[in-house]
Amino acid sequence: MSEGAARWDRALRALTLLAVDPAGLRGMVLRARVGPVRQKFEALVADLGGEAHRIHPEIGDAELYGGLDVTATLAAGRPVVTGGLADRPCRLILPMAERCAPDLAARLAQLLDASPGHSLILLDEGAEADERAPAPLSERLAFTADLDGIGRLEARGELPHAAIAAARARLPRIALPDEAAAALTALAARFGIDSLRAPLLALRAARAAAALDGRDAVAEDDIREAAELVYPSRATQAPEPPPEEDDTPPQEPPEPEAETPDDDGQLGDLPEELLVEAVAALLPPDLLTRLAEGKASRAARGSGAGAKRRGNRRGRPLPSRPGRPGGRERVDLVATLRAAAPWQTIRRRHEPGPGRVRVHASDIRLRRYEDRSDRLVIFTVDASGSLAMTRLNEAKGAVELLLAEAYARRDHVALIAFRGAGAELLLPPTRSLVQTKRRLAALPGGGGTPLAAGLQAAGLLAHQAQGRGLSPRLAILTDGRANVSLEGAGGRAQATEDAARMARLLRAQGVPALVIDTAARRGDAGRTLSDGLGAAYLALPRADARRLSGAISSALGD
Amino acid sequence: MTPVFPFSAIVGQEQMKLAMILTAIEPGLGGVLVFGDRGTGKSTAVRALAALLPPIRVVQGCPVNAETPEAVPDWALGVGEEIVEKPTPVVDLPLGVTEDRVTGALDIERALVSGEKVFQPGLLAQANRGYLYIDEVNLLEDHIVDLLLDVAQSGQNVVEREGLSIRHPARFVLVGSGNPEEGELRPQLLDRFGLSVEVASPTDIDERIEVVRRRDAFETERDAFMAHWGAEDARVRDRILAARECLRGVEAPDEALRDCAQLCVALGADGLRGELTLLRAGRALAAYEGAEALGRQHLRRVAPLALSHRLRRDPLDESGSGARVARVVEEVLA
């Protein structure tokens, strides 16, 4: 059997198990682009029977939880409440699941946790590796099937309806041998699956498999099948060799939470290695790259998940627009009445009855706001002796130039200087140009170059700013030649190492940066620093005013 | 409503369970923040705790769960005099919730249809005298967080908008949970939580197996499971109730106060909130254990809960704030 056909069969088997125990297995993630194969699978999903609803990533609370039916309410003149999808057990199908916002994911997760009968099918159409259905949801669903690359002719088969009905009847009586839970839990640990939901779902899957195959108790085959269906997509590490073979600690796994399995994880008579091999054979081929990407994008996602939603301090009102009030919007009363006003005479003629103002659903106007995060440019200026003699004034000039630019763009600015033993926040984030200039002019020079301390201070400030909804950018003016360590002690080696470490931390924090090299003679130090930070690089000696301001605009982005 | 997983059946996670019990004894502690990985039982514990607590007596139909008819706010229409019992409210605050929904707002539909100006109470009213649970609290939008902070501080929700001027009591225990990988919490909000716990999946394989077994039993043999653990839960409930009774009688000797202050100074915790929480949490623990006075053994156990989130962030200390607190506790209370 070809690889594609085998994958299709597994997906079909997963769907069959789901049909047997939808409440226990909760659903599946289907990763596939739109195409005949997905269509075929969706037809099978529709064939499951029972109540099903297609929802969309922008679904409102009213549809989900029920709420006031505005049209019916206005027509009836008294509140008419409609039920929501959460009220009765049903199967929800969410297309474009990779675009699902975290708040919808949280609500659906709550729904799955609280309700006994809901199941969820996520149709994940992500094209890139990092476009995925939200983790809080996919973690709660038993199965994941990747249909990409399966040929149209390989997608064959129907749901065995008779067997499913029989299995449903048998399901409550399926006995579970004692060692099954232990085996599945231990196996999950071997693959670095941290969440305990995974073994629970696997247990349910094993039960459903036993019921489907007409057994009264869960057998070894069922356990293997459950593990094969539930674990591969969740694995965070390839299985380590069995513990008795290596007494040295295993190589540091990519995920810190991965643990070595205990020797005394009793497996009864289940051949653990067979299970491990069965699952390992199905690990997604891109497991390692995915892990690496997951780590790399984590920092960016950490700020990114919030930046859009919470990164906005205020909103500029936009014209209201017609719409249906859901949970998120507020009705613009005045605009709504204004929209209704011209129609009043006609409406009164056609709809006699009491009531002064006749408002129809089409009159309702919703408020809209546009908001955008403010930018904060953190100037981190090297005021050490090596710079003070010759170039501090030029650096100050450059900062003033950037300040003017920042002022024109209504950015916030902050100023950090480092010299001698440590760094100092000279000016907390402000919009006051005058204050900044004054502090800058008074900036004394001299002493060592505690680059690491400067970077640390900048990182802390950037972190705080992110929390306040600003988008921080760093502009670092230095020659990059650190000679004071983070602890304030001299010594170039330690200082350089500390600086490199802080640069890495800053990079992981995901703050865009620009390094302006102020060294009189060009050296590698500035370049090394900018590489460590993943920052843009600009050598001051040959930068004039226009180039500088152009560079900072393009380097720091919008 | 399906039965929730019993509190006492939760395997391990002792710190989290202790923190929750302490807030149940002393609601004035200011809530719990639970940070940790997915699938570690955060939500389960919150819901289990609420199910464990005894029902509260409220005026029937009152939107703010008032205890006596006199306490019913005057804007609440059609509320009777009858007192009924209802379970301790646990209100979920979903992400993406609107301000209107949280504070309450003008009832637009009533305003449009009948021209009446009626206040439609929000989640804060519902949560009064109960729990307000925010899952993924670190992803909550800023303006909602500000609003919550203000109300949690004052115990009153004030609505001044759309021609309404309304205030009602909103005293609730704030429980937040989240996954630190997805975003951090602003220090202002961190500080407002009385206790904080970091949870992780158990690393011991036997413990993990026990978790899976119990959860599986809960799902497949619910009646037998609930019968067994329901009795355990009742025992915990009785202890909580007894502790509430004797909480005011627990003495806090001068040495204990001095210990609290010393711990906070040694850790460099900002403000005095740390000391106060430490003291209150220690007393609640002493009451729970039936002790007559607050002692060092109590402080030692609650210090990580009360202080670990109040430390200044140190990006280079990889050991985590919990370890730092433990170290200082060992030094100060040696």
Image: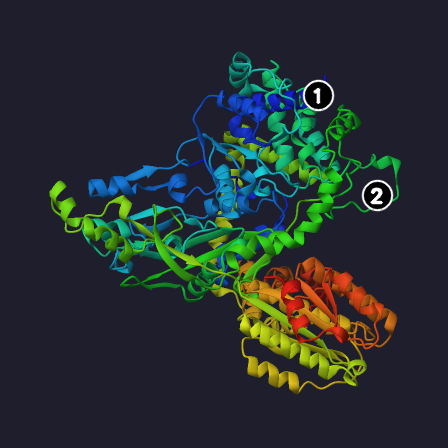
Q: Nearer the viewer, residue B60 or A425?
A: A425
Task: Give the left or right position of residue A408, taking residue A146 as reference.
Answer: left
Please say whether residue B51 is visible from this viewpoint: yes
Mark whose residue sits in front, 2 or 1: 2
Q: Which residue is mark 2?
A: A250
For label 2, the SS is loop
Left or right: A451, with B191 as reference point: right
Circle 1 is placed at which residue position? A220
Quarter of image, res A437: bottom right
Write down the chain letter for disc 2.
A
N-terminal-most mark, 2 or 1: 1
Residue type at mark 1 is Glu
For the residues marked 2 and 1, what is the alpha-carbon distance in whole angstroms? 29 Å
Helix, strand or loop at mark 1 = helix
Instruction: Characterize the local packing of mark 2: few (<14), some (14-19) or many (20 or more) Cα atoms within 10 angstroms.
Output: few
- Give the image location of residue B82, x and y in percent: 25, 49
Location of residue A89 (image quadrant): top left
The residue located at (54%, 51%) in the rendering is B136
Residue A272 position in % (x across, y down): 77, 28
